[in-house]
Image: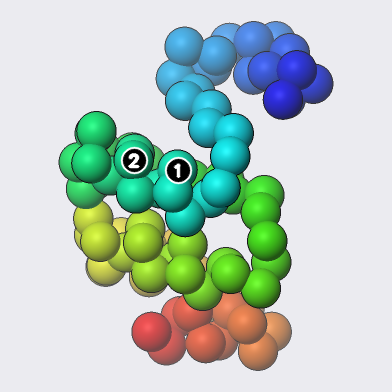
Amino acid sequence: MAVARRYWEMAGVGHKVCERLGNATESLNRLLLEEGPGSFDLAFIDADKRQYWRYYEQLLVGDRDCFKSLVPSQWTRPCTISIGAY
């Protein structure tokens, strides 16, 4: 996290970043309980890749249409087609 934090600060966005270290599912649940759905614009998750579908589902709680729009229709990789079709 120290490396990431250094770059957030260099980019001048450190005050906008809320870092969470721990189990991603639990962290997302806490974030949604504390801040509420739709309280964030971007989520970067570096976690267990096999559970990405779960994190995506949790993030959809706030605004399904918003997250669907993050997957451009011209992307053709199977994983993005699946997310975009959701």
The residue that appears at 53% across and 50% down in the rendered structure is 24
Q: Do the residues labelled 2 and 1 touch (CB within 8 Å)?
A: yes
What x and y, as percent, mark residue 34?
24, 33
Crowd band around label 2 with a 10 angstrom C-alpha radius: few (<14), some (14–19), many (20+)? few
The residue that appears at 64% across and 10% down in the rendered structure is 9
Report whether 2 appears left or right of 51: right
* Quadrant where the image shows the C terminus: bottom left
The secondary structure type at the circle numbered 2 is helix
What x and y, as percent, mark residue 26?
44, 49
* Residue carrying label 2: 30
Answer whether residue 74 is visible to the viewer in this image.
no
What x and y, as percent, mark residue 40?
33, 38
Q: Name which quarter of the figure residue 16 lies in.
A: top left
- State the CA–CA distance, disc 2 to disc 1: 5 Å
* Quadrant where the image shows the N terminus: top right
The residue that appears at 52% across and 87% down in the rendered structure is 82
What x and y, as percent, mark residue 57?
38, 69
Answer above or below: position of 70 versus 13: below
Query: Mark 1 is on which residue type?
Result: Ser
Answer above or below: position of 26 versus 56: above
> Of residues 64 and 21, which is closer to you in this image?
21
Report whether 47 appears left or right of 60: right
The secondary structure type at the circle numbered 1 is helix
Q: In this figure, what is the number of numbered marks?
A: 2
Residue most extreme to the right: 3
Query: Which label sits on residue 27?
Result: 1
Report whether 22 appears left or right of 48: left
Crowd band around label 1 with a 10 angstrom C-alpha radius: few (<14), some (14–19), many (20+)? some
Query: Mark 2 is on which residue type?
Result: Arg
The residue that appears at 45% across and 43% down in the rendered structure is 27
Answer whether residue 62 is visible to the viewer in this image.
yes
